Amino acid sequence: MASGQIDIETIKAMLGLCDEDLVKPLPIPTKWSKPFWEAALQHKLVLKKCSKCGNIDHPPYMYCTACMADDHEWVEASGKGTLAAYAINIFGVPFPFWADLPYVVALIDLAEGPRMISNIVECDHDRLENGMELEVVFDDVTDEVTLPKWRPVDESRRG
Amino acid sequence: MGIGEFAIIGTGEVPCGNYPERSEFEVAYSVARMAIQDSGLDKNDIGAVLCAQHIMSNPDNDYNTEMVFGRLPEAIGAKGCKVTCMTSSGGASSYSIRKTAEGILRSGEADTVLVVHAQRFTQFTPNEQAKYFSIAGSDVEWEVPYGMTFNSLAAMITQGYMNYTGTTIEQIAAVCVACRKWAMLQPNAMFNHKEITVDKVVNARMVSYPLTTLMCNVLGDGGSAFIMTTAEKARKVCDRPVYFLGEGSNYSHRTITRGDVKDLDQMTTFTAPIAKEAYERSGLGPEDMDIYEIYGSYPVVNLMVMDSLGFVEPGKSGALVEAGETSPGGKYPCSTNGEAMSFGHSGTGVGFAMLVESVRQLQGKAGAAQVEGARFLIENCGGGAFMDCHFAVMGNEIPG
Ligand SMILES: [Zn+2]
């Protein structure tokens, strides 16, 4: 895979970007998703489970999308998943992500059922494989925000 | 819904591409006049004027606000206009606005509706466009913080589809080549002057593996319009009305992770029943279609839609495209305006461009791209991050 490294200072000058244009977007929690991000900060992956019908909603919404009930609990997920599909971003991403190129975004199927979009980190890009087993890792991107990400369980696939 | 209850009797379109000096207002007024003149009606016959919301707004002179507040009927002198409004559902806007038009026609308040789309991206800087599209296709809370983009979404769907169906990257590229061949025959297409090859598409700059730049659509300024009326009136005022014979629709998700269908080789379990419904309502089948006007915007989506249309075994569309069967002269002409990939992606206008091309084909007005003797076709659109899917069987006659 060819590296997409392009000097960000050149891009900045070329397009007249300011420093603010290079700040990474962070999740802005809603009333009903706040517990997810608070748990992530504690390095826990949690899911919103309806107390009435047992449905797990991810992303979570205000009330259960199966039965419209409010009552719910946050259950800790196993942190295990599999890789459904992936893309390796090489070029043409939002400016705050240029410095990270190349990076992997993927569809991850959690053992508990829901599917997530996240990054596959600590991996050899040539050894990504549909269906491979993944485990959650936590990236403390700021003091207030932690992003759950995923890495291969098989150490030989790590890079 | 009755078969052939509504019809389109005229269309207008401006070239798609980079036209920074051409305001959305200029585009809207131009295509409106073209469509009215093409229909042969008088402007004062127009009883309702509907505008598609365009995406990205200029706060200094906001097109959307102006259209919502009735600028268009006044500007084009539509003295008989009783109703005006704006409708949008992203890439599915050509569908939802048509349904709005049907409601107005069915109410009896008006018997002739003008529908207009106009877009100008080039008034915004590349950074502004990049910012808009970095969140338009993705969820700001759950996807954008991970560096997700529209291209990455299409890339991972392509990666999964190829892996699960055995489709090759050359077959993915062949979709772009076929679209370019059609665009070469279209005076309004953004990319109509240079052919491309599978080799060139595969070896173009990698954007989001496995997609190269030539597998990603390019934004362009553009616009089009059409005149819709009841079948009864259409027959009186038009030599060759184009009828809606049967339609099907479904919605899946906003966030791709919550899509109705999880397996990337099983997408046809979502889309095929929608096409089947459209076919059944029209009383026609895939074998009756002369053209398949598919709006994919990325090659993999074109293949997934082909997989659901009943003329090819699901998962084998890539081979069919590679063999040239969807290109000009092929057995299954697909996306005859060159599609978003080569016609250009005019925001909410891609579906309008496809619909307007469908009408031109069935009216025998498609010029060099004309599929000889086309009588029936199936038209398709969808919006968001592949949120929904719509099919319409159209024809220049009502099958008896
Ligand atoms: Zn529930």
Image (tube, rainbow, N blue to C red):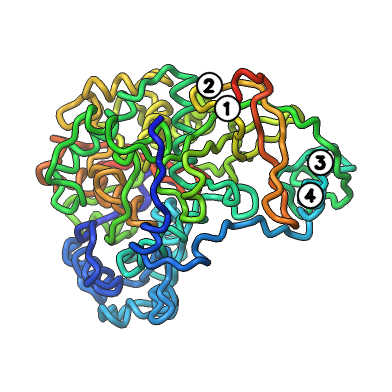
Q: Secondary structure at mark 3?
A: loop
Where residue B212 sits, quadrant-wise, is top left
Q: Secondary structure at mark 1?
A: loop
Q: Residue at x 60, y 51 (%)?
A: B145
Q: Which residue is mark 3?
A: A44
Under mark 2, the amino acid is Arg
Q: Earlier in the sequence, mark 2 or mark 1?
A: 2
Q: CA distance from mark 3 to mark 2?
A: 27 Å
Query: Tags 4 and 2 in contact by the CB under 8 Å rule?
Result: no
Q: Position of residue B340 (x, y in %)?
A: 31, 46
Q: Which residue is mark 2?
A: A127
In which quadrant is the C terminus of chain A drawn? top right
Answer whether residue A68 is visible to the viewer in this image: no
Residues tagged by mark 1 and mark 3 found on one chain of the structure: yes
Residues tagged by mark 3 and mark 4 found on one chain of the structure: yes
4 vs 1, front mark: 1
1 vs 3, front mark: 1
Under mark 1, the amino acid is Gly
Which chain does the residue under circle 1 lie in? Answer: A
Residues tagged by mark 4 and mark 2 found on one chain of the structure: yes
Q: Residue at x 13, y 35 (%)?
A: B372
Q: Residue at x 27, y 52 (%)?
A: B356
Establish whether ligand 1 lies closer than 8 Å to the Cβ of label 4. no
Which chain does the residue under circle 4 lie in? Answer: A
